[in-house]
Image (tube, helix red, strand yellow):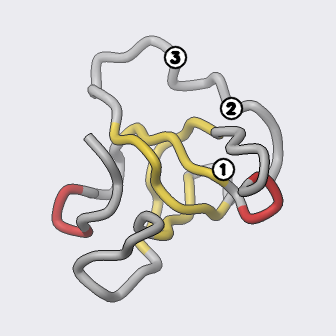
């Protein structure tokens, strides 16, 4: 599921985000949503969130909760 609809994203969900400096490369960072930062219900580039580890980026994919790769962040944003 993509991250363009705010209603689909909840705090505590496992997501893949792209950080600002990774937009050109498309490198994704995985983590748990701490806070939803975008106020609108839809955004063409993805809803902006803050992860539990403090990184901020736009959601590119919402992952199933039973995924074992929760801690596989690829680096700081």
Q: Quadrant of the C terminus?
A: bottom right
Q: Quadrant of the N terminus?
A: top left
- Marks 1 and 2, Cα distance to the nearest angstrom? 9 Å
> Are there few (<14), some (14-19), or many (20+) residues within 10 Å of tag 3?
few
Front residue (pair 47, 49): 47
Label 3 close to label 1 by CB (< 8 Å): no
Q: Is residue 50 above or below residue 68?
A: below
x and y percentages locating residue 46 in the rendered image: 43, 64
Label 3 close to label 2 by CB (< 8 Å): no
Q: Is residue 71 above or below residue 22?
A: above
For image coordinates 51% across by 25% down, the residue present is 70
Single out the residue that lies furthest toward the bottom: 39
- Marks 3 and 1, Cα distance to the nearest angstrom? 15 Å
The residue beneath circle 2 is: 73
Q: Is residue 46 above or below residue 26?
A: below
Q: Secondary structure at mark 3?
A: loop
Q: Which mark, by number, is residue 53?
A: 1
Say whether residue 50 is left or right of residue 29: left
Q: Which mark, by number, is residue 69?
A: 3
**Image quadrant assignment for residue 7:** bottom left
Label 1 close to label 2 by CB (< 8 Å): yes
Q: Nearer the viewer, mark 3 or mark 1?
A: 3
Say whether residue 31 is left or right of residue 60: right
x and y percentages locating residue 54 in the rendered image: 68, 59
x and y percentages locating residue 41 in the rendered image: 23, 80
Single out the residue that lies furthest toward the left: 7
For image coordinates 52% across by 17% down, the residue present is 69
> Are there few (<14), some (14-19), or many (20+) residues within 10 Å of tag 2?
some
Q: Nearer the viewer, mark 1 or mark 2?
A: 2
> Are there few (<14), some (14-19), or many (20+) residues within 10 Å of tag 1?
few
Front residue (pair 34, 47): 47
């Amino acid at each position: 599921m993509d991250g363009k609809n705010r209603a689909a994203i909840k705090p505590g969900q496992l997501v893949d985000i792209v950080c600002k400096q990774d937009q050109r490369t498309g490198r994704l960072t995985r983590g748990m949503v701490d806070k939803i930062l975008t106020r609108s219900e839809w955004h063409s580039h993805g809803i902006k969130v803050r992860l539990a580890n403090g990184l901020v980026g736009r959601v590119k994919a919402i992952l199933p909760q039973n995924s074992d790769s929760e801690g596989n962040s690829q680096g700081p944003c």
